[in-house]
Each structure stands twice: as structure tokens, then as C-alpha cells.
Image (cartoon, rainbow, N blue to C red):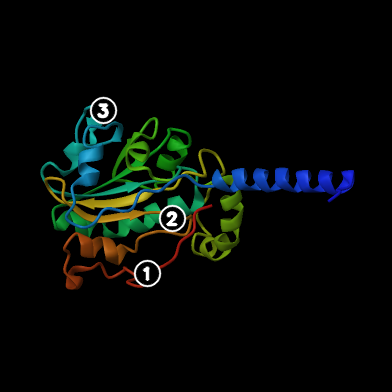
Amino acid sequence: MRFSRVSVFSAAAAAVAATSLSVLFSRATFHQAMATQKGSTHVADAIKDVEVETVRGASDSNYVKVGSFWQDQTVVIHILRRFGCKLCRYNALELQKIVPTLEDHNVRIIAIGIEKLGLKEFQDGGFWNGELYIDNGKKIHNALSIKSVGILNSFKMLYDIRDALKKANDVSGNLKGDGRQLGATFVIAKGGTMLMDFRQKDFADQPSLESILEACGVDRKDYPSNLNTESERLVCD
């Protein structure tokens, strides 16, 4: 059987194109480990020795080990995507609604950023007034395989941003920083037992305030009056 030069060239070009697309899509996302089950100590064991830099903490130490957060009480650990993200700022403001309730139930709540870029603006804007730390080098993400979204998938997710932006219409934001890294929210009991392991699968993932309170064992009658108990799908830009 004879093949023309054109057909051979076309086949070769198609193969190269297919390979290139395969490589691009394979790089679109990094592997995400399965979220650990309630009662597991896997997360606590993996990150307990990670040192994070103190921005605003309970002690005067410049650096603290993550394991100290759950040493004496249950803790909610909210890992921010980036300080300039409009929706991340909105989510932080939403989380602050339940801080008094958590504190009344002896639950500690902290936020951890992945870089210092945009920190001052984040603080000046009053988006988070609680404990705040920086995980320089994303050591927590590396230890737990919290994924980063590839360029192709980022474009796929842009369509979902419109509705979420309406909720954060009055919140400022910018595009500075690592916008492709996803975040997570953990609720860890005293001693390191997992109560909730929520890892973003895409920019639209965010645990409801109700689910966080429930994981912390807060009775529904004690929920704050300004809490919307309907789970909302929020998108970070």
C-alpha cells in the first residue's frame, strides 16, 4: 500500500498535535489526595511539624508549629488561596460571622496564607481580624497534595465566576499572586482527630458556614442570627 507524502505528513502532524494536547491536559491539574475521613489523624500527623510565620497570633512567637493549634482545643484552619482574590476576601468576611459563636464554644479559628504578596492590603481592608499566619513555601499544600489548577482548567472555570461576583460586588480585589493554587478548610479536634476535611476541587468549592459549625459540634439553636444556612457555591477569581 502506497501513502502520499501529504498523507504521511498529515498523519505525523496529527500525532504531534494529539501528543501536545495530551501533555497540556495532563499538566492542567496536579494530583489531589482524597480527603481524609472523620476520625483520622492523617492530616494532623502530616502537618503538625510545619512551621508557619505569625502575622497576628495568640503568642509573640515569630514562627509556630501547626500542631500547636489543636494542642488544647478544637481548631478551624482556613487556608486562603491568595490575599488579593476578591472572592477569597469575601469568604474571609463571611467566616468572621461565626467567629464569636466558635469562640463561645471554645473553638479556635485561624487563617493561613501561602505568600506575603498582598498581605498589607488584605489587613488594611479588614477582611480578616482573627489569627493569621503565612505558610512560606506552601509546605502544608505539599504535605497534603492540595492541588493547583492548570491554565486550561482555569479558563474552563472562568464561566462560573459571574454569579459569585455578584455576591462580592462591594469587595475589592486584584490579580496579584498565585491565583491557580486551591485552598482548604480543616476542622481538627483537640489532639489531632479530623472532624472536617474540605479541599477545593475547583474555584467554586467553599464549605458552608453551617457545615463548619456542625463539624465543631455547635447546636443549631446557637447558630448566629445572620447566618444563611443554605449551602452556597462560591467562586474565587
Residue 44 percent location from the top left of the image:
21, 43
Q: CA distance from mark 1 to mark 3?
A: 35 Å
Q: Nearer the viewer, mark 2 or mark 3?
A: 2
State the residue position of label 2: 201
Point 38% across, 52% down: residue: 92
* Mark 3: amino acid: Tyr
Tell which circle, 1 or 3, labels the residue nearer the N-terminal end: 3
Point 16% across, 44% down: residue: 70
Q: CA distance from mark 2 to mark 1?
A: 16 Å
Q: Nearer the viewer, mark 2 or mark 1?
A: 2
Q: CA distance from mark 2 to mark 3?
A: 29 Å
Point 88% across, 43% down: residue: 5
Q: Give the class, few, some or many, for how many residues have Cα within 10 Å of label 3's Cα (few <14, many ≥20).
A: some
SS for tag 3? Answer: strand
State the residue position of label 1: 231
State the residue position of label 3: 63
Residue 131 percent location from the top left of the image:
27, 42
SS for tag 1? Answer: loop
* Mark 1: amino acid: Ser
Residue 80 percent location from the top left of the image:
39, 46
User: In this rendering, is residue 224 above or below 25?
Assistant: below
Tell which circle, 2 or 3, labels the residue nearer the N-terminal end: 3
SS for tag 2? Answer: loop
